[in-house]
Amino acid sequence: MTTHSHTVLDFRIVTYNVHRCCGMDRRVLPRRIANVLSALKPDVIALQEVLGIGPKGRGQDEILGATLGMGWVMAPARLRRGTPFGNMILSRFPIVDDAQHTLTWKRRRGRSCQRADLKIDGQILHVYNVHLGTGLRERQYQAERLSDILDQQKGRGPKIVLGDFNEWGRGVTTDILTPRFRSLDLRPFLKRRRTYPGLLPLLHLDHIFFEGDIEVRHVSLPKTRDTLIASDHLPLVADLRIHV
C-alpha cells in the first residue's frame, strides 16, 4: 500500500472463491489459501465459500484472519453440515461498519451480499462481496435485489462490488449494474481472462464493478503452482487508485 499524496491512495484488492479451502487435490488446507493470499500482498480481500466456526470448533475465517494478520468480518449465507458457510471480507484498513443482505431466491441455496465499510484516510469505501446463484432466473432476481441494496448507500462515497457472479459473459447482472457502475475490463491487462476451474480455467466467473473516483492501475490472475491447486477458482487481483 503506497500513499502518493494527501489525496491519492493506491491499494490492492482481491476477490477469491476459496471453495471451502478444498484444493484440486481434495485437501482442505486453510493455511495454503492464506499463503496464496499473503504472497499477493493485498490490502482488501473478498472471499466466497468460507466455513465459519462450527461443531468441530475453529473456523476457516478465524484461521485466515489470524494467519494474514488482517481485520475481518464473516457473513454466513447458510449452514453446510451444521457449519456457517458464506462470504468473508478482510482488510488492512479499519472496518467501521458491516452488514449482510440475503440474496436467496425461493428454495435455492442460501446466497448473500456482504457489505463492509472501510475507513481510508478519512473517507469511507463501501465494499460489497457477493456470490450469486447458478440459475438464470435466480441471478436475475439477485441482480435486481443487489441493485436495491446498492441504492441504500447511493451518493455516500465510492463503492466496489466484487465476487463470484457465476456469469461467464455479459448477463443479467452486468445489464443491471453497468448503467451505474463501471465494470473492471480485463482485456487491457490480460490475454487469458478465465478464472474457473483453477487448474485449467475455462470460464470467467469472477468480476469487479466500481463507482466513484476510482482508477484501475493493473489487473492480474496469478497462475502459480499454489494458485492452480489451492482452490477451483483463481484469485482475481486489481491494483486500484482512489482519490480521497
Image (cartoon, grey):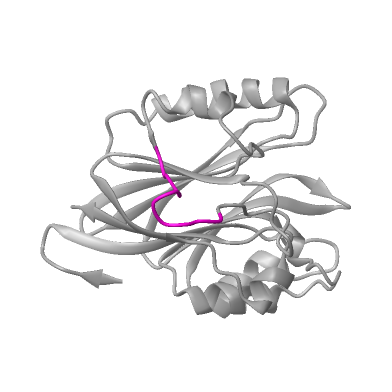
Nearest to the observer: residue 232 or residue 199: 199
**Residue 197, horizontal then vertical, whole percent:** 73, 56
Is residue 190 located in the magenta-colored stretch of the structure?
Answer: yes
Q: Is residue 33 above or below residue 95?
A: below
Is residue 122 located in the magenta-colored stretch of the structure?
Answer: no
**Residue 134, horizontal then vertical, whole percent:** 74, 34
Quadrant of the image for the N terminus? Answer: bottom left
Nearest to the observer: residue 243 or residue 107: 243
Residue at screen point 40% across, 27% down: 152
Whether residue 186 sits left or right of residue 86 in the image: it is left
**Residue 240, horizontal then vertical, whole percent:** 32, 57
**Residue 149, horizontal then vertical, whole percent:** 48, 28
Q: From this viewpoint, is residue 73 visible?
A: yes
Residue at screen point 75% across, 52% down: 84
Residue at screen point 69% across, 53% down: 196
- Residue span colored magenta: 183-192
Q: From this viewpoint, is residue 162 visible?
A: no
Q: In terms of image quadrants, where is residue 59?
A: bottom right
